[in-house]
Image: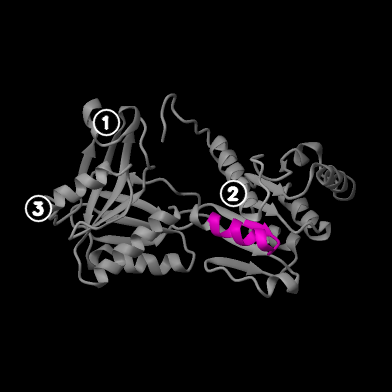
């Protein structure tokens, strides 16, 4: 679940607290190309106010039109499909003749949205199971590695909370931008900095700060294929310790700030003092980030997340369909 969809749940819960009627739409299937991935959310209030997005706006407009026509007065979850034919796909802004299916769910006390949000606020990964006959939802801990939405004839199972994790070494100015952007992309973010002069003033809502030594933090983090680690201190005593452990692990992305000259020196240190192999060192992204001519801290943070995103999707074998602009 990305941060946009978490915001949809929060908005929907707020509307419910005001005793407003709310219908929650979840993308359950797509065929061809679609503007948003499976699991994306949109909420429609009883007066036509929209939160979230599942298309470029055309489907949202249609949902509002259906609500005003009275066809969204639902008593249980109901599927709705858009773009069955090419003409309808164009009408609803689905690129390349795509087809998209929504599960429309009238929210109520049985939906367990408040409980879900409470658990997400504690950083939990949660599995939500929606009974399609009754509209009642139950919650459980997400299974390790599980992220896929599953739709059967009787229930819809979705996973919520950060699946992807980012560990940043260093709590400097650039980390502020990197952490906030990463939160918006759905990462669970942890920042490590044992230096009091940096850690004392670092506070970002939703970000965990640890003052332990970087190598210990990386080890305790247990990096896996959904983990990115970025070293930003410019201090070899801190960055090198973190990279030593990170490059031996399974993180999908390991990056370090510094010029090409400094990167060459870093590689030599890691090989000589810590015994890292050439194969392990080749996993290091440095200079960190895509080369977009970035100069300012927010621009560099953007370049780092752009490279992380590219590596993440390449690792998953994802490729955009020819001729599609999503």
Classify mark 2: residues with Cα within 10 Å, few (<14), some (14-19) or many (20+): many
Report if the CB atoms under discs 1 and 3 are less than 8 Å apart: no
Does residue 278 lie above or below 298 as drawn?
above
Q: Position of residue 10 (x, y in %)?
A: 35, 64
Quarter-wise, where is residue 62 in the image?
top left
Residue at numbered disc 2: 302
Residue at numbered disc 3: 70
Residue 90: give its label.
1
Does residue 101 lie above or below 116 as drawn?
above
Q: Main secondary structure of the magenta part?
A: helix
Q: Which residues are magenta?
A: 167-182
- The residue located at (60%, 58%) in the rendering is 177
Classify mark 3: residues with Cα within 10 Å, few (<14), some (14-19) or many (20+): few
Q: Position of residue 195 (x, y in %)?
A: 76, 70
- The residue located at (59%, 67%) in the rendering is 208
Q: Position of residue 201 (x, y in %)?
A: 66, 74
Quarter-wise, where is residue 293 in the image?
top right
* Mark 2 or mark 1: whose residue is earlier in sequence: 1
């Amino acid at each position: 679940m990305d941060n946009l969809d978490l915001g949809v749940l929060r908005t929907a819960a707020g509307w419910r607290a005001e005793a407003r009627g709310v219908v929650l739409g979840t993308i359950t299937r797509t065929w061809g190309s679609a503007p948003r991935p499976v699991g994306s959310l949109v909420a429609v209030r009883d007066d036509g106010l929209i939160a979230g997005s599942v298309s470029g706006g055309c489907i949202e407009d249609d949902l509002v039109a259906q609500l005003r026509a009275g066809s969204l007065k639902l008593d249980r979850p109901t599927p709705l499909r858009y773009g069955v034919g090419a003409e309808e796909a164009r009408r609803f802004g689905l690129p390349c003749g795509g087809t998209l299916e929504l599960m429309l769910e009238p929210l109520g006390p049985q939906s367990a949205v408040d409980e879900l949000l409470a658990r997400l606020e504690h950083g939990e990964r949660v599995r939500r199971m929606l009974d399609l006959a009754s509209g009642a939802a139950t919650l459980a801990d997400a299974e390790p590695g599980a992220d896929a939405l599953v739709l059967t004839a009787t229930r819809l199972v979705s996973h919520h909370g950060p699946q992807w994790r980012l560990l940043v070494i260093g709590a400097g100015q650039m980390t502020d931008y990197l952490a906030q952007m990463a939160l918006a992309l759905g990462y669970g973010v942890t920042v490590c900095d044992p230096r009091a002069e940096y850690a004392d003033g670092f506070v970002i809502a939703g970000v965990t700060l640890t003052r332990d030594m970087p190598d210990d933090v990386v080890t305790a983090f247990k990096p896996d294929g959904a983990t990115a680690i970025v070293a930003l201190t410019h201090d070899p005593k801190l960055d090198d310790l973190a990279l030593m452990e990170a490059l031996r692990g399974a993180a999908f992305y390991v990056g370090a700030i510094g010029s090409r000259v400094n990167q060459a020196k870093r590689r030599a240190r890691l090989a000589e003092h810590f015994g890292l192999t050439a194969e392990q060192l080749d996993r290091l992204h440095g200079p960190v980030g895509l080369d977009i001519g970035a100069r300012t801290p927010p621009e560099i943070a953007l370049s780092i997340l752009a490279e992380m995103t590219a590596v993440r999707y390449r690792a998953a074998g994802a490729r955009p369909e020819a001729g599609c602009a999503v």
